[in-house]
Image (cartoon, rainbow, N blue to C red):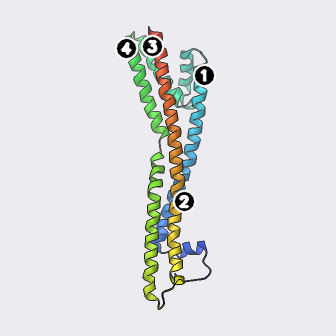
Amino acid sequence: MHPTSDISLLQLLLDASIPVQLVMLTLLGISVWSWTYIFSKRATLKRAHEQTQRFEDDFWAGGDLAVLQQTIATRRNEHGALARIFESGMTEFMKARRNHASTDTVLDGARRAMRATYQREMDSLESHLNFLATAGSVSPYIGLLGTVWGIMQAFLGLSTTQQATLAAVAPGIAEALIATAIGLFAAIPAVVAYNRYTSEIDRLSIRFDSFIDEFLNILQRQVR
């Protein structure tokens, strides 16, 4: 790149060396995917909170649990994770009662069914979080790689000039530093979203765990 007194950001990007441009494109792709997962996960968790609250209101309203189980079973995908956990436990409980199983067998079957569904629901809620964590961790280093390469090329270019001046290396250094800036731009939202969504999922996990324990206590009273 030749020194110029009028350096625009777009011109720096266009005039960057091929390796630096590849780094920038990689970071741009990571950023696009990160924001896609950020918005998608935000909508998913908002819906999960609303569905969990709605189911808890229905459950603690004191209605017939068998009727509630049948209602959920007909449209499982519309009622949320906690409703599906309840439905799996209640289904197993009713099946064991019909087979005249012992109290311990009935409760153990319901517990295992709910725990299996709980794990599947948590895996679904945590999907794509690993990508956000990875993006937040590696993006600054990818940007730094582009920066190091660009600065190295800028100083190597001094060997072809008769007089080493700041104006001669400024464009090359500027384009290199842009790679670091893009890396941070990709990393910071991913890290913030990962931390926030992990916290929200942990709160949902605690609510699910508490419900399983409380529901098992209710079932235990019914089989006595």
Identified by mark 4, the residue type is Asp
Name the residue that disc number 4 marks: 104
- Whole-number angstrom distance, CA of label 1 to CA of label 2: 44 Å
- Whole-number angstrom distance, CA of label 3 to CA of label 4: 9 Å
Residue 2 showing in the rendered view? no
Identified by mark 3, the residue type is Gln
Badge 1 density bin: few <14, some 14–19, many ≥20, Cα 10 Å: some
Q: In the figure, 128 relative to 8: above or below? A: above
Q: Evaluate if marks 1 and 2 touch, with contact meaning CB atoms under 8 Å apart.
A: no
Identified by mark 1, the residue type is Asp
Q: Evaluate if marks 1 and 4 touch, with contact meaning CB atoms under 8 Å apart.
A: no
Q: Earlier in the sequence, mark 4 or mark 2?
A: 4
Q: Evaluate if marks 3 and 4 touch, with contact meaning CB atoms under 8 Å apart.
A: no
Name the residue that disc number 2 marks: 185
Q: Position of residue 210 (x, y in %)?
A: 49, 25
Q: Quadrant of the C terminus?
A: top left
Badge 2 density bin: few <14, some 14–19, many ≥20, Cα 10 Å: some
- Whole-number angstrom distance, CA of label 1 to CA of label 3: 20 Å
Identified at 41% across, 29% down, the residue is 116
Identified by mark 2, the residue type is Phe
Examine the image and state in which quarter residue 104 appears: top left
- Whole-number angstrom distance, CA of label 1 to CA of label 4: 28 Å
Q: Evaluate if marks 1 and 3 touch, with contact meaning CB atoms under 8 Å apart.
A: no
Question: Which disc, if any, is residue 58?
Answer: 1
